[in-house]
Image (cartoon, grey):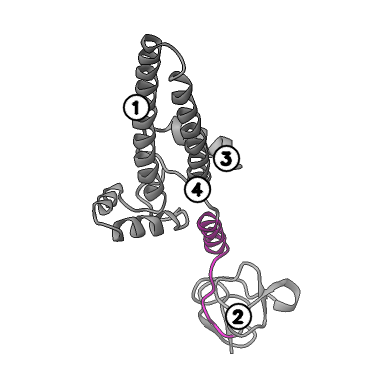
Amino acid sequence: MNYCQKCGNKLDENVEFCPKCGQEVLNIDQVATKFCSNCGKKIPAASDYCPNCGVQLKSNSTQENSTKQQAIIDKPYNENKNPDPINSIVLFFKDTFHVSKRLGRADYWWARLTAAVVGLTLSLIWITAIMQVQTVSNAISSILTILLIILTLVLGVWWVIASITADIRRLHDVGISGAFLFLLLLPSIGNIVIFVMTLLPSKQINNRYAN
């Protein structure tokens, strides 16, 4: 029993055209360029149905779309093409006041690691500066101390805001609302939940936050 490669209609022996759709019955041995996924026999490349077993086949466009979609899913999102400590920390602070964007996992963790190192370095510098200030006259010491405190407060506020918005953008990248950051109000468990969320891979398909 043969089947029409266009509509799947059963065909009688020795017919040249399908009586249902008019498709020409081709010599499979001459035009076959692929194999049926169901029976494994040779079939023409343009077949919608297997001429041998009659099973409906995925069209080429469907297969291509599926392949492209899978490629999008598998490709991790990062705003920087090559995330590294410098580019990622620049992005971290540059988008301090942006929460509508996304932040890829690599960029996020490179920025977090770099910020921790920079923060520790600045703390040591601050302590050293305070100690040096104490060696000058009282008037100058007071002025320098006030300036250091103001600078510390400015950098501290900037750091806090940048951290919060970075967390929001990271959650958006995995398709989760930034409102989940309120879980941080829960002792211990909230930090663990958010930490796990930031470890999730980018979600490219069905992500309402993706552009």
Mark 3 closeness class: few <14, some 14–19, many ≥20 residues within 10 Å? some
Do labels 1 and 4 touch, CB within 8 Å? Answer: no
Q: Is residue 114 above or below residue 7?
A: above
Mark 3 residue type: Pro
Closer to viewer: mark 1 or mark 3? 1
Q: Which residue is at 37% across, 48% downward?
A: 172
- Secondary structure of the residue carrying numbered label 2: loop
Question: Pointer 1 and pointer 3: residues touching (CB < 8 Å)?
Answer: no
Q: Secondary structure at mark 1?
A: helix
Q: Position of residue 100 (x, y in %)?
A: 35, 38
Q: Is residue 83 above or below residue 197?
A: above
Location of mark 2 (residue): 51
Going from N to C along the chain, the mark reached first, 4 or 2, is 2
The residue sitting at 45% across, 44% down in the picture is 103
Above or below, 160 relative to 10: above
Between 162 and 65, the one nearer to me in the picture: 162
Asked if the residue under mark 2 is in contact with the one under mark 4, i.e. CB atoms within 8 Å, the reply is: no
Could you tell me the amino acid type at mark 2?
Answer: Pro
Q: Give the mark, 1 or 3, whose residue is nearer the N terminus.
A: 3
Query: Alpha carbon of mark 1 to alpha carbon of mark 3: how far?
Result: 24 Å
Q: Which residue is mark 1?
A: 153
Disc 4 from disc 3: Cα separation: 9 Å
Q: Which residues are magenta?
A: 53-74
What residue lies at 37% left-to-right and 34% top-to-bottom? 98
Looking at the image, which is closer to me, 117 or 141? 141
Comes first in the chain, label 1 or label 4: 4
- Which image quadrant: the C terminus? top left
Compute the Cα span from label 4 to label 2. Answer: 54 Å
Name the residue located 49 percent from the left edge and 50 percent from the top edge.
105
Nearer to us of marks 1 and 4 is 1
Q: Nearer the viewer, residue 27 or 44?
A: 44
For badge 1, the amino acid type reads Leu
